[in-house]
Image: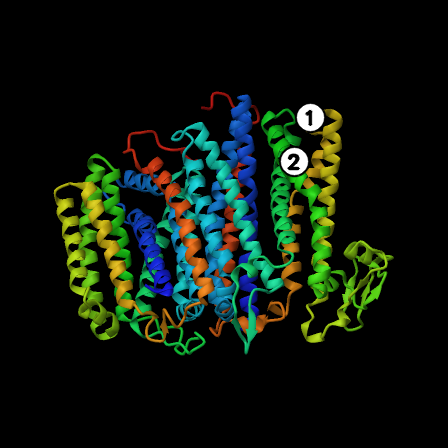
Amino acid sequence: MTLPDALAAAMAVALVAYVLLGGADYGGGIWDLLASGPRRREQRARIEQAIGPIWEANHVWLILVVVVLFTGFPTAFAAVSTTLFVPLTLLLVGIVLRGAAFTFRAYDRPDDRVQRAWGLVFSASSVLAPLVLGAAVGALASGRLRVGPDGMPLGGPAAWLSPFTAATGLLAAALFAFLAAVYLTVEARGPLREDFRRRAIGAGAAVFGAALAAAVLSWREAPLVFHGLTRRAWSIPLHLATAAAAVSAFAALLARRFRLARGAAAAQAGLIVLGWAASLRPYLVVPDVTIAGASAPPETQRLLLLALVAGTVTLVPSLWLLFRVFKREGPGTPGGDEPG
Amino acid sequence: MTDLAAARWLFGTSLAFHILFAAVGVALPLLMVLAEWRWRRTGSEVHLELARRWAKGAAILFAVGAVSGTVISFELGLLWPRFMAFAGSIIGMPFSLEGFAFFAEAIFLGIYLYGWERVSPRLHLASGILVVASGALSAFFVTLANAWMNHPAGFALVLGKATDVRPLDAMFVPGWSHEVLHVLLSSYAATGFAVAGIHAFFLRRAPGSAFHRAALGIALAVGGGAALLQPLSGDLSARQIAVNQPLKLAAAEGHFHTGRGVPLHLGGIPDAGAAVTRWSLEIPRGLSLLAFHDPDAEVKGMLDFPRDRWPDPVKVHLAFQAMVGLGTAMAAVALLGLALAWRRREVPAGRRFLLAVVLTSPAGFLALEAGWLVTEWGRQPFAIWGVMRTADAVTPVSDLTAPLWIFGALYLFLAVMVGTLLWRQMVHAPAEPAGGAP
């Protein structure tokens, strides 16, 4: 594996982590918006408790992807930023409003009107962010983002929009909602757990539909990805593994084996992202920006890889501690410091 | 408005906004950890209450800092893609390392804020200390990137492309340590004074409050200490800039004609056309003395440099005067506080002193913004001094006024909300020591 490939792989891993952790936090916001039935208040409280201590740490995975991209592949960062100006700006609006509203809701007055208003901002921006993120990520593979040799765009500001990217946007939102609901089945108890189980099954079906739509549309709109997804040596084993994870997740949900479902759902989501990344290779932006072509000088890439290794060594135990403190126990144990 | 102007306004607004939360994120955890440490050592319940209140403030401010920082990391590419395409490989390292520092900050702040009842006292305090350390580390790394823009090094320029890239040399350019020290002190001074001012305000209303008195003690110790050290750090910075960025120093001082034993302009407005600074108070030999610690030293004036490399001396000089003036006022209040505390052997809480603290409360943040403007305006028209002009760094994407309005409105809304929520936290603070807290 070459140095640029190693860094690209590191970005893919960070993106998987962002989807599995940060993605589920957006998913929590989606279920806040869709909270319904007699336990809607409890659903929202459970979601808030689940993501409160960890969402900021989970969010940093995205920052990590961005800094590795601009340090290791500077022209690719320029190409991505200019061609995806509109969706990335919308993503930022979503990120800012989601984080701010979630925190403000926790520290503002407990009275219903105020809480509902913040909840609406929090949940609506939790829907917006995955839609535009998924569309942006899909657009990278679409071949519609053309750039010159300096990384500056040749197309217009709407080049990222197409039925295919609409499908990948919906896929991201469905996937995040699915992950959140499955995780919440492990953390909730009693009837609340059943609420999230039903939601997980529904979202799982939506993931299947959106993934199918994206795959079919990619045949016409993103031929390189379609080719990567179907014709490479690893294509069939990857699809089989993803399908196996998806089926296991469904079966485990039906059988109420929630921990198993959580593992299978995470595997499924991770494999979807890795499959996308592997089919994108050797491109970063199809068809004008490649991993090799956009690479920073080897001195920089070597040092960056070293920093990533050193950072990971300090990061992993810290993250392990964070999740052990807040995710080890089930509900019923005393919550953290209740803000308010 | 041209797209370049819109890009500069948008990036400037984003940074001016983020910088406040970044500085608080560096310094407020220190106050909160000091309060908790005091409680653990003495069992003083007001200090526990204080640590919890400050932690809630930190939670609100850190969340806004985290998301506004995310905006900046994306805007580097959204607004300045040519800058990033050129400089990413040279200066990306400190940003990457800052990413890890930010990770540690977010993880341990999560444990600190939500872990009061979940983790052992020792781990809780240790988490707080790690938040303090990683916050300072973040500021350290990000300031290195700024130092490089002022004094680019660690690469060779061949036909407009960077070659022979040495990222470690780029991280530690001449003057990095002075700039880092200055930024860190400014964060502690600004946050300490802002917090002290809030508690001084309430202490004037309720002079008996042990809660506000304890808060004032910690905030003044941190803010006042930093404010007293800051003039020394400023002196180091000025002497370094005199050597490494002489044009910036000349603009900041409104100094046009190279000469020996040149005067210092206090106040006044530089007139670039006539190459004089009018209506200022001149201190003979002052600038030579300050810049080189030698009353006869030669100090380069702006006229020594080509006109097309000049920053706007009016903006740079006024921002510089504001920074120095505000910093001096803070140092004076800190000195007064130190004298009073030493004489009375307790936190000074006389009404007139409290009024002085209230009045200088916003000074630190204003000085911080002014100082940031000095270094940014003083580098114009370059994004990377001598290498890339700001006009050549801007994105080819058009209609940038739209995101400018969107983010302008967003920041205004967030600022109002944060202010309201923090105010409410403090208004409901106990007038008397809280009893019975766990």
Badge 2: few (under 14), some or many (20 or more) residues near its Cα, within 10 Å?
A: many
Q: How is the image coloured?
A: rainbow
Judging by the rendered image, the residue that carries numbered circle 1 is: B346
Badge 1: few (under 14), some or many (20 or more) residues near its Cα, within 10 Å?
A: few
Q: How many marks?
A: 2
Quadrant in which the N terminus of chain B is drawn: bottom right
Residue B48 is labelled as none
Which of these two is toward me, B222 or A315? A315
Q: Quadrant for residue A241, please give it.
A: bottom left
Element at label 1: loop
Specify which label sits upstream in the sequence, 1 or 2.
2
Residue shown at 36% from the left, 59% from the top: A11
Asked if one can make out residue B72 in the rendered structure from this viewpoint, the answer is no
Residue type, mark 1 in image: Glu
Q: CA distance from mark 1 to mark 2?
A: 12 Å
Residue shown at 24% from the left, 58% from the top: A272
Q: Chain of mark 2?
A: B
Asked if one can make out residue B11 in the rendered structure from this viewpoint, the answer is yes
Residue shown at 71% from the left, 66% from the top: B247
Element at label 2: helix
Q: Residue B86: horizontal and vertical position, in percent?
A: 51, 70
Judging by the rendered image, the residue that carries numbered circle 2 is: B220
Side of B57 relative to A80 (left or right): right
Whether residue B343 is situated above or below residue A54 in the rendered picture: above
Residue shown at 71% from the left, 37% from the top: B355
Tag 1–tag 2 contact (CB < 8 Å)? no
Residue type, mark 2 in image: Leu
Which of these two is toward me, B393 or A162? B393
Q: Residue A226: horizontal and vertical position, in percent?
A: 22, 70
Side of A337 relative to B22 (left or right): left
Q: Residue A46: horizontal and vertical position, in percent?
A: 30, 39
Q: Quadrant for residue A52, please give it.
A: top left
